[in-house]
Image (spheres, grey):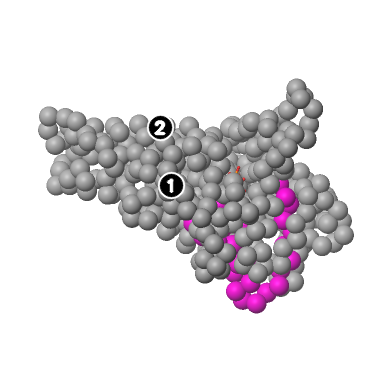
Amino acid sequence: MNTTSQSAADREKRELASLRWTGDYLEMLDQRLLPEQIIFLALQEAEEVWEAIFSMKVRGAPAIGIAAAYGVYLGIRHYEPVGSSERERRLDLERKVNEVADRLATSRPTAVNLFWALDRIRRLASGWGTADVLDSSIDDLKKAVLREAVRIQEEDETTCRLIGEHALSLFQDGMGVLTHCNAGGLATARYGTALAPFYLAKAQGWKLKVFADETRPVLQGARLTAFELQQAGIDVTLICDNMAGMVMAKGWIQAVIVGTDRIAANGDVANKIGTYSVAVLAKAHGIPFYVASPLSTIDMNTPTGEQIPIEERHESEITEGFGKRTAPQGVKVFNPAFDVTPNEYVTAIITEKGIVRPSYKENLPKLFQ
Ligand code: MRU
């Protein structure tokens, strides 16, 4: 894997994209190094994509899904399928697609976009031994996987823009809005989900005041949200997670908006650890709590939040989170990466198809009809 760094001058010129297909390899911004260093990785192998998702070089539900889709292509592009007929060779390539997808699916458990994107690729490959594709060469089929990955990325940009437009209809010029974690351009193809309305508001001359929770333990709010909003010239104030109640009590927050990693069929929302506390605080202060979510993050196969698998990460994220040890050796640590906000705390879910309000059990299925 090669790396390239970007100078301050380059940075001025181009908006930072977390993922870019160069025509030869997947260029990935190493988000672990932000905001101090802008380093791009050149990923050539599916296994490198697996490692990048696992170690959070790329993170954020939609971006993880996009990366995995490219990962499948990287995993099959040099594969020589075996078989005594063209049909057998196509079937072997389909088997390989599923093998690579199975591996990538083990990289992180909570964000459903990973599985959603891999399923899209699996569906594309299913039936490669049938008459419908008999005219396609092995190379054509491989290219079809790449095209699907590009499509997933392009669709995500459109989706995020639409989410931003719907979200903006809930805001007013001058409002204070609090967000948690990073659900911005870095976590998606572009714009973000929860951060999209901030970009659109800025474009129409509104002055929203954004408060970004720093988001312990990995600090996505400080390292990513504060960084990308500041770069875009948006008024952002960074606070520690435990300051959210105080800024709400001061009357500085008129809305909360967050992204999500998975929404269950009853509207329970899994998102970055700490989101639940923010939702409870919002309710206590009579502040609306909005969740920005593409349809690809709504998992109608998971009935409630209780069935959402919650990733637990290494204890060092807490005991050495600031680059030096900040806790006694041997202390017991609990480090869930996500929590579930029960649906009764969620004022509305903002999707590319519009704004959904309770009852989520009744209204979420309508999105998929
Ligand atoms: O652990 P991360 O950084 O991948 O978690 C990210 C989040 O929880 C985001 O809020 C979520 O994925 C939404 S991104 C549009």
Residue 208 among magenta residues: yes
Asked if the residues shown at circle 1 and circle 2 are in contact, with their CB atoms under 8 angstroms apart, the answer is no
| Label 1 CB sits under 8 Å from any ligand 1 atom | no
Residue toward you, 295 or 62: 62
In the image, is residue 133 above or below residue 12? above
Question: Which quadrant of the rendered structure holds the N terminus?
Answer: top left
Q: Label 2 sits on what residue type?
A: Asp
Q: In this picture, is 112 found above or below 239?
A: above
Say what secondary structure mark 1 lies in. Answer: strand
- Disc tally is 2
Nearer to the camera, 295 or 369: 295
Residue at the location (50% across, 35% down)?
Answer: 107
Is 52 colored magenta in this rendering? Answer: no
Which one is nearer the viewer's eye here, 368 or 33?
Answer: 33
- Graded by Cα atoms within 10 Å as few (under 14), some (14 to 19) or many (20 or more), the crowding at tag 1 reads few
Res 168 visible: no
The residue that label 2 is drawn on is: 102
Residue bearing mark 1: 2
Q: Is residue 274 left or right of residue 80?
A: right
Q: Is mark 2 within 8 Å of ligand 1?
A: no
Name the side, left or right, on which 285 lies relative to 123. Answer: right
Look at the image and give the residue range highlighted in magenta: 186-215
